[in-house]
Image (cartoon, helix red, strand yellow):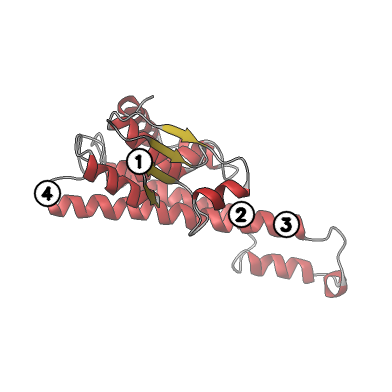
Amino acid sequence: MSQRIVLYGPRRTPYTEKVRRALVLKGLDFELCEPGGPEDYRRWSPETGLLPVLAIGAERVADSTRILLRIDELWPKPPLLSPDPVIAAQQRQLEDWADESFLWYWNRWLALVRRRESESPQPRGLLRIPGVRQALAWLRAGGSWERPETALLRGVDDRLADLVNLLGTRRFFYADQPSIADFGVYGMLFVLRMDAMLGSARLIANRPSLIEFMRRFEDVTGG
């Protein structure tokens, strides 16, 4: 009797999406349960409160990277890592980079949004002095008059350029078939394409090779 597989996680996140598509690629039947509130995060992931978590029968696996490695161990066809150890190491490194780089920019974007929401509309104290608010804005922008959001988007665009160069003319990263690297990269692009960071969808649209990569990836992982 086959084991029941349940993926717990919010659908519109890079980490849930990369796991969902890996399960589709493996041809596995599974359920997707999305959290309805903070209590679901605590109930489904009591140790860290973070999702996604994959339940395979009585076994529970947290963290999207660990989940992909575990399902590849249990269901090795088609493989998510190259049989060549050198290429496999490159694939794992790119997957980790995609996860961490997106998280870095995303956390800073959220911090900017929350700070602006918490700022009082009326200046107080030193902020009433002419020039002080402008000086603080200059410091927050890293010593330039560029808006912090613009600087973050410029950084994201630089990372997209890195991906374009790394992909080159290949169908997928490091191979002709999707690997763990492609799932990590696609998860990042998936959320940026939804304009998670206002303006990020435009950055994706300006990179035709990445749009084509996403289309190819979707063709083999469930549309």
The foreground one among 1 and 83 is: 1
Q: Give the residue type that dot 4 points to.
A: Asp
- Marks 2/1: CA–CA distance: 36 Å
Which dot marks residue 84?
4
- For the residues labelled 3 and 1, the Cα–Cα distance comes to 44 Å
Q: Position of residue 66 (x, y in %)?
A: 33, 52
Judging from the image, what secondary structure is the residue with disc 2 in?
Answer: helix
Q: Residues within 10 Å of mark 1 (few under 14, many from 20)?
A: few
How packed is label 3: few (under 14 Cα within 10 Å), some, or many (20 or more)?
few
Give the residue at mark 1: 57
Which comes sooner in the sequence, label 2 or label 3?
2
Q: In the structure shown, which secondary structural element does the residue marked by tag 3 occupy?
A: helix
Judging by the rendered image, the residue that carries numbered circle 3 is: 116
According to the image, label 2 marks what residue? Answer: 110
The reply to whether the C-beta atoms of the residues labelled 2 and 4 are less than 8 Å apart is: no
Between discs 3 and 1, the one toward the N terminus: 1
Residue at 60 percent across and 43 percent down: it is: 198
Q: Pointer 1 and pointer 4: residues touching (CB < 8 Å)?
A: no
Which quadrant is home to the C terminus? Answer: top left
Amino acid type indicated by mark 3: Arg
Q: Give the residue type that dot 2 points to.
A: Leu
Q: Is residue 217 visible?
A: yes
- Residue 107: give x, y in percent of width and height: 55, 57
Q: Residue at x 49, y 59 (%)?
A: 48
Q: Is residue 131 above or below residue 49?
A: below
Which badge, 2 or 1, comes first in the chain's sequence? 1
